[in-house]
Image (spheres, rainbow, N blue to C red):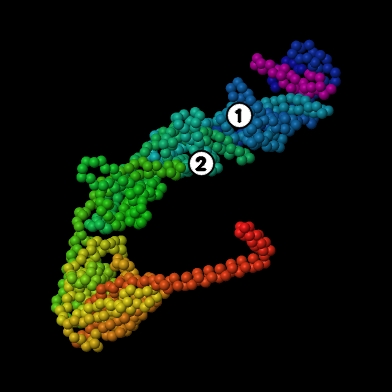
C-alpha cells in the first residue's frame, strides 16, 4: 500500500477501505474490518452509509503466484500444464477463502474454474464438459490455493489470473470481506503440425484390387494416437453431401470397414486402404482424414490436430482379355464309324484376370459346293457357370454317349465323336468366350473369339468284298470227305473281321425240294462256331468250319452221303469295329458255288401211294399204302432201309402247308403227330417196300390229299449207310362222305315214338272227358237228333 493514501473510509458492519492514489489512478484498498457500533454518515459523494467502528480487522489476506513446475510458457497441444497460486490469511476470525481462475485473450476475460467459499467447484461457461471429463484437476496443497492442472488445447492460450476472496459467515449468512488478484502466467500453445498425403491420380483395372497409402507427417513424437478415416466421394470436395466412409482405424487401433474393404497399419506413419475386386462404381475421389488424440484424465481423450488429404482421383479401366483360339483335329476319320477328336485351345493370353474364366461353344456347318448361304448349327454351349447345353443336332447322340464334350485342361476343350457317320462330314469350329465375375458373384460374357474351321471329310467309296470258293479234290465218291476253302478280299473296309456261313442248295433239276437253301454251319467274327440247320443227329461231328488265316476259311464234311449232293457256298460278312468291343456290318458277299455230284450207278427209288378206299363214309377205316419200287442194280434187302413219313394237305388243292401225320424211321421207330379230332392213326411196315397208314374212325376233317415221303438208306461196300435223296409220291385225294340212312335213322325212330305216345295220350284224355264230364248232354242230344230224323222222314 502506498504512503500517499489520502483518506480512509469506514463502513458500518463491514470492511474498512482506503482510497489511494497511485500515479494518477485511484484504487480502493481494504484496510480493516469494523465489527459493531454506530457510525456517522460521511458526506463524500462516492461513499454512503460509511462510518468508523470501534473494532477494526487488519488486512490479513496474502495472494501470490507460486513458481510454476510446468514445462514453460510455450506448450504443445495436449501437453499438461499446471498453474499455481498461493493464498493465505492471518485473520483471527473463522474466514473462508474462495478462488477463481480467469484467462484473458485480448480484451475478453473468461472464467475457467472457481472454488467457492463453501468448497464447491464451479466450471466457467464453456468448460463444463472438460470439467466433467476430469481435465481440470484440483489438489489441495495444505493451506495454499489448489493449482490449475489441464491438458493444453489451442483454446487455452492466454494470460491466466488467480483471484482469491475471503469470506466470513455470521448467523448463516456469508459476506465477502475482501478480494485480491494476481497474474500467474501467460501460456502460449504451439499448434501441432499434421499433414496427410495420398497419391493424386491412380488407375486400376476392373476386377483388380485398389491399394491407396495415406502417409502422415507430424512434429509430435509424444504419446499421441492417430485416428485414420478413409472416405469416398463422387466429387473432389469431401465436405459436400454424398461422401461415405469406407474404413476407419480408431485410436484404439480397431478397424471398422465396409465389405470388400480393408485398412491396415503398414508402419508408424503409413496406413494402407485396400478395395478388393473394383468395378466402375469404385471410380471417384478418395480422402484420408487423420486426427491426433492425446490422453486426458479419467480415460478421456482430446483431439489435438486433424488433417484431410488432397483427393486421390481413381479411375477404373477395363482391360479386355486378349487371347487367340486354335482348333486342331487330333484324330481324323478315314472311314465311317471312325473316331473323330477335335481340340480347341487358348493361346497368347494377355491381361489375364483372376476374375475371368473361359468357356467354349461348338458349331457345325455342312459343306456346300455352291454359293448358298449355310447357317451354323449349335452342337453345345458352355455357360459361365460351367453348365453345358446341347443343341438339337447333338442332344440325342450326346445322351447315347456318341458325342462327348470335355475340358481336360484349363486352356483346352475337347469334342469327341465316338462313331463318325457320313452325316457328320462338314466344317467344325469353336468359339471361346471370356466371362467376367460381377459383384453379385454372377458371370457376364465380355468377349468371343472364333477359331478357324476344320473340315472333316473322307471320300465315300463303296465297300468291296469278294469271296472265292474252291474245291481241292474235285472228284470223290460217297463216304469220302468233302472240303471247300473260301478266300476273302476286301476294299474300303476299316479293320475288317469276317463271319462265314456255309449254305447248301439242291442241284439244278432236282425237283424234290426246289428253291430251298439250307444253312449248315457258321463262324462269327469272334471265331465262335455254331451249327445252324444241321439236324442229322448221327452226324453232329460230321461238319467242321475253321479259320485258316484272317482272310481264308475251310469247310469240311466227313462221310458224305448221296443226299448231301447239291451246291455249296460261303456267305461272308465283313464287320468293322465300333466303340471298342462293338461291331458294325460293313458288307456281305456270296461266293461261287461248289457242287457235290456223286457219279454212281446205284438203284433208283420211286414211291407211289395206293388206296382201295379213296372214298369212305364217316367212321370207316381209311387204308393208304406207300409202295417203293427199285430200278437199276439189284440190292440185297438187308442193304436197304427207308425213312417213311406221311403228310396230308386238308384241302381240295395243294395251296395249304402239309401236315405231318406219322413217320417211321429205318430202325422201326414210329412217331405220330397229335390231332384235334377223334380219328386215330397207325403206321406199319407191311413188307420191305410197302408201308401202310390207317385212319381209324374217320372224320369229316380227314379229307384231303395224302402223300408219303421216303428217304432211302443204302449200305455202301465199306459198310457205312449212305443216305439217298429224299423222294415223294404223288398225292391221292381221300373223300369222307356222310351215311344218310344212318344219319336219319335215329331221328326218325324218335319222331315216330314221340308221335305215338302223344296220340295215345290225347285219346285217353278224350275218353275220360266224354265218359265222366259230358255223358248227360250227349244223351239229350241223341234224342233230339232222333226226333229230328223222324220229322225229316215224315
Residue 793 in picture, x, y percent from top left: 61, 59
For this rendering, which residue is in front, 222 or 569? 569
Residue 539 in picture, x, y percent from top left: 27, 80
- Is there any visible trace of residue 43 in the rendered image? yes
Q: Which residue is mark 2?
A: 257
Q: Earlier in the sequence, mark 2 or mark 1?
A: 1
For this rendering, which residue is in front, 364 or 726? 726
At x 72% / y 32%, what residue is drawn? 120
Drawn side of residue 54 relative to residue 771, left or right: right
Q: Which residue is mark 1?
A: 185
Q: Which residues are magenta?
A: 10-36
62 is higher (above) or lower (below) than 768? above
Q: Are marks 2 and 1 in contact (CB under 8 Å)?
A: no
The Cα–Cα distance between marks 2 and 1, rounded to whole angstroms, is 46 Å
At x 24% / y 87%, what residue is drawn? 637
For this rendering, which residue is in front, 154 or 665? 665
Q: Does the segment drawn in magenta span residue 31?
A: yes
At x 30% / y 50%, what residue is drawn? 345
Q: Residue furthest front?
A: 794
**Magenta stretch prevailing secondary structure:** strand
For this rendering, which residue is in front, 146 or 719? 719
Q: Does the segment drawn in magenta span residue 92?
A: no
81 is higher (above) or lower (below) than 497? above
Q: Secondary structure at mark 1?
A: strand
Amino acid at each position: 500500500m502506498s504512503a500517499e493514501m489520502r483518506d480512509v473510509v469506514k463502513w458500518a458492519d463491514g470492511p474498512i477501505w482506503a482510497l489511494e492514489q497511485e500515479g494518477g489512478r485511484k484504487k480502493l484498498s481494504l484496510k480493516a474490518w469494523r465489527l459493531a457500533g454506530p457510525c456517522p454518515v460521511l458526506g463524500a459523494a462516492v461513499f454512503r452509509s460509511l462510518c468508523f467502528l470501534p473494532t477494526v480487522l487488519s488486512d490479513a489476506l496474502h495472494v501470490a503466484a507460486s513458481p510454476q513446475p510446468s514445462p514453460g510458457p510455450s506448450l504443445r497441444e495436449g501437453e499438461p500444464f499446471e498453474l499455481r497460486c498461493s493464498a493465505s490469511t492471518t485473520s483471527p476470525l473463522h474466514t473462508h477463502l474462495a478462488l477463481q481462475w480467469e484467462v484473458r485473450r485480448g480484451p475478453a476475460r473468461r472464467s475457467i474454474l472457481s472454488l467457492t467459499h463453501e468448497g464447491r467447484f464451479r466450471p466457467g461457461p464453456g468448460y463444463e464438459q472438460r470439467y466433467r471429463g476430469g481435465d481440470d484437476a484440483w489438489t489441495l496443497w495444505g493451506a495454499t490455493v489448489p493449482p490449475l492442472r489441464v491438458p493444453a488445447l489451442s483454446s487455452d492460450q492466454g494470460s491466466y489470473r488467480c483471484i482469491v476472496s475471503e469470506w466470513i459467515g455470521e448467523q448463516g449468512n456469508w459476506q465477502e470481506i475482501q478480494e485480491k488478484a494476481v497474474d500467474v502466467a501467460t501460456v502460449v500453445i504451439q499448434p501441432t503440425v499434421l499433414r496427410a498425403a495420398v497419391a493424386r491420380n491412380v488407375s486400376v483395372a476392373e476386377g483388380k484390387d485398389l491399394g491407396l497409402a495415406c502417409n502422415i507427417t507430424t512434429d509430435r513424437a509424444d504419446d499421441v494416437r492417430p485416428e485414420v478415416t478413409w472416405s469416398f466421394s463422387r466429387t473432389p470436395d469431401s465436405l459436400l453431401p454424398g461422401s461415405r466412409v469406407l474404413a476407419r482405424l480408431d485410436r484404439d487401433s480397431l478397424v471398422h470397414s465396409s465389405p470388400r474393404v480393408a485398412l491396415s497399419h503398414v508402419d508408424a506413419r503409413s496406413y494402407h486402404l485396400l478395395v478388393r475386386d473394383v468395378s466402375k462404381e469404385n471410380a471417384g475421389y478418395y480422402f484420408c482424414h487423420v486426427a491426433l488424440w492425446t490422453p486426458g484424465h479419467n480415460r478421456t481423450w482430446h483431439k489435438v490436430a486433424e488433417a484431410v488429404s488432397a483427393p486421390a482421383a481413381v479411375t477404373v479401366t477395363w482391360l479386355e482379355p486378349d487371347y487367340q483360339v486354335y482348333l486342331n483335329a487330333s484324330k481324323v476319320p478315314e472311314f465311317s464309324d471312325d473316331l473323330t477328336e477335335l481340340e480347341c485351345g487358348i493361346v497368347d493370353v494377355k491381361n489375364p484376370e483372376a476374375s475371368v474364366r473361359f468357356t467354349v461353344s461348338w458349331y457345325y456347318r455342312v459343306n456346300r459346293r455352291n454359293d448358298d448361304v449355310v447357317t451354323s448349327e449349335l452342337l453345345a454351349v458352355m455357360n459361365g457357370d460351367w453348365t453345358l447345353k446341347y443343341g438339337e443336332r447333338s442332344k440325342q447322340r450326346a445322351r447315347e454317349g456318341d458325342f462327348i464334350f470335355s475340358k481336360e485342361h484349363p486352356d483346352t476343350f475337347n469334342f469327341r465323336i465316338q462313331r463318325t457317320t457320313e452325316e457328320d462330314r462338314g466344317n467344325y469350329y469353336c468359339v471361346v468366350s471370356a466371362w467376367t465375375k460381377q459383384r453379385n458373384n454372377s458371370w457376364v460374357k465380355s468377349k468371343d473369339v472364333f477359331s478357324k474351321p476344320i473340315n472333316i471329310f473322307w471320300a465315300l467309296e463303296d465297300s468291296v468284298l469278294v469271296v472265292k470258293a474252291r474245291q481241292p479234290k474235285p472228284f470223290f465218291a460217297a463216304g469220302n470227305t468233302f472240303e471247300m476253302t473260301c478266300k476273302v478280299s476286301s476294299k474300303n473296309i476299316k479293320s475288317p473281321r469276317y463271319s462265314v456261313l456255309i449254305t447248301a442248295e439242291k442241284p439244278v433239276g432236282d425237283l424234290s425240294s426246289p428253291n430251298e437253301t439250307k444253312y449248315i454251319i457258321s463262324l462269327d467274327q469272334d471265331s465262335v462256331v455254331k451249327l445252324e440247320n444241321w439236324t442229322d443227329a448221327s452226324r453232329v461231328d460230321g461238319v467242321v468250319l475253321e479259320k485258316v488265316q484272317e482272310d481264308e476259311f475251310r469247310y469240311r464234311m466227313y462221310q458224305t452221303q448221296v443226299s448231301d449232293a447239291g451246291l455249296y457256298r460261303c456267305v461272308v460278312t465283313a464287320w468293322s469295329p465300333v466303340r471298342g468291343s462293338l461291331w458294325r456290318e460293313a458288307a456281305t458277299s456270296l461266293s461261287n458255288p461248289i457242287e457235290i455230284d456223286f457219279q454212281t450207278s446205284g438203284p433208283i427209288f420211286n414211291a407211289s401211294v395206293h388206296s382201295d378206299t379213296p372214298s369212305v363214309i364217316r367212321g370207316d377205316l381209311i387204308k393208304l399204302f406207300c409202295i417203293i419200287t427199285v430200278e437199276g442194280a439189284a440190292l440185297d434187302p438187308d442193304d436197304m432201309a427207308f425213312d417213311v413219313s406221311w403228310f396230308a394237305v386238308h384241302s381240295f388243292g395243294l395251296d395249304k402247308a402239309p401236315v405231318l401225320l406219322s413217320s417211321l424211321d429205318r430202325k422201326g421207330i414210329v412217331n405220330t403227330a397229335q390231332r384235334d379230332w377223334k380219328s386215330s392213326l397207325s403206321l406199319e411196315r407191311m413188307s420191305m417196300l410197302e408201308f401202310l397208314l390207317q385212319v381209324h374212325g374217320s372224320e369229316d376233317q380227314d379229307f384231303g390229299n395224302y402223300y408219303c415221303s421216303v428217304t432211302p438208306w443204302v449200305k455202301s461196300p465199306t459198310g457205312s449207310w449212305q443216305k439217298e435223296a429224299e423222294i415223294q409220291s404223288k398225292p391221292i385225294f381221300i373223300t369222307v362222305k356222310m351215311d344218310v340212312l344212318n344219319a336219319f335213322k335215329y331221328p326218325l325212330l324218335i319222331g315216330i315214338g314221340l308221335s305215338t305216345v302223344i296220340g295215345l295220350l290225347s285219346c285217353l284224355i278224350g275218353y275220360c272227358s266224354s265218359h265222366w264230364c259230358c255223358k248227360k248232354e250227349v244223351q239229350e242230344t241223341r234224342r233230339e237228333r232222333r226226333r229230328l230224323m223222324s220229322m225229316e222222314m215224315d
